[in-house]
Amino acid sequence: MHSAHSQSHHLLLGVTGGIAAYKTAELIRLLIKQGHTVQVVMTEAATHFITPTTLQALSGNPVFVDSWDTRIANAMPHIELSRKADAILVAPSSADFIAKLAHGFANDLLSTLCLARECPLLIAPAMNKQMWENPSTQRNIEQLLKDQVTLLGPDSGEQACGEVGQGRMLEPDMLLEGVQTHFTPKLLAGKKILITAGATMEMLDPVRGITNISSGKMGFALAKVATQMGAEVTLIYGQATAARPQVSHAYHASTAHDMYQSVMHHIANQDVFIAVAAVADYSPLASADQKIKKSEETLTIELKKNKDILADVASLPNPPYCVGFAAETERVLEHARQKRLDKKIAMIVANQADLALGNDNNSVTLIDASGEYPQDIADKTTIAAKILTHLKRQLN
Ligand code: CTP
């Protein structure tokens, strides 16, 4: 199932000569899974790193390499192929190809397509770090940015040549995120949004703690989509198994107390606060310095109530627009309605705890002063887009 917030687009995917071309195979798979269609065009050099057959099989479309390809009826593949595309993405984009783009060369099919395009161009550089740092490459990149080309990456880390540094192509999932960001309308541009996500952990002793089974998926999905919609996102996260998205600011907070402190520290000037974290309601009265040894047949742990982050933010003198989550196992809507009123928050997202926790999908009802809005069951990215789109209407 693909995310409804990013409708399907037709991408012209350019592949140039670089080891990272093997990752393009995975990228194509991810793009197609999201509902996009992909037309691959390779440079001759790229075919030395991955075969057109592989990319044809994955994209489901014939791959073009040659400007003189006779498969296009009007013998103008450089015009034909780019006219159908919503965007061109060149991944990997070699240093040589970047130089060609910066100077407007058109001496093979892919560079000609880029020059003849009417659609946006995104590039994912991939090269050795010296090549990336070379003043000529940097000059070319600067020129491309001035020309409104979107740069995805590069990443830093280990390189195929054995060196470590900047120049690696972004991983396929990050490239997919970059493409999604490109296509997402900037509904929340200029808005500052603080989001808590994941589970807190209350330590009993140095090796044990009380936590819950929140995966962080819903909070991370909201952080990702809000970022794609142009918001400046501050993410305060506890324990999470899901992959954390790139956001403007991210801080780890382990305990409910730490999370409280961190939220209060960052809350000024936020337009929106979305509390998704599963915060422990209680923490141990005392946490042992050393590992607790087993002795008696029963062990009693005394707990004290934690402060409610969401309720306290909502009662600040000039509160942001507050959104809470109600994860319930019974009488979901009834409890959610009551929570919204008790915490004095603008919106609450009601969901069935046992279905939502840890799952990729969720089924929610949005409740605010204007009414109740049940949403179809969908993946958490889609649910996040629904919540943020609804919230945007309320902000106006
Ligand atoms: N929340 C918070 N700080 C806390 C506890 C909860 O910010 N100390 C937020 C959660 O992020 C979520 C909402 O409040 O948005 C959940 O409400 P809550 O009443 O705490 O839910 P439960 O912990 O499930 O409470 P109950 O056991 O009363 O159902």
Image (spheres, rainbow, N blue to C red):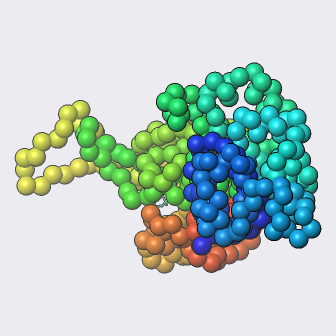
Q: Would residue 391 appear left or right of 383 to someone viewing this image?
A: right
Q: How many marks?
A: 0
Residue drawn 77% across and 37% down? 98
Q: Is residue 23 above or below residue 147?
A: below
| Whether residue 82 is visible | no
| Residue sitting farthest toward the top | 135
Pick the residue in front: 366 or 306. 366
Residue 19: image quadrant is: top right
> Residue 381 in the image: x percent, y percent?
62, 63
> Residue 249 in the image: x percent, y percent?
62, 38
> Residue 383 in the image: x percent, y percent?
63, 67
Which quarter of the figure is the C terminus placed in? bottom right
Q: Would residue 57 appear left or right of 201 to someone viewing this image?
A: right
Residue drawn 81% across and 26% down? 139
| Whether residue 161 is visible | yes
Pick the residue in front: 2 or 211. 2
> Residue 32 in the image: x percent, y percent?
64, 66
Residue drawn 65% across and 54% down? 176
Q: Is residue 41 above or below residue 115?
A: below
Q: Would residue 63 appear left or right of 222 to someone viewing this image?
A: right
Residue drawn 51% across and 51% down? 243
Which quarter of the figure is the N terminus placed in? bottom right
Pick the residue in front: 66 or 39. 66
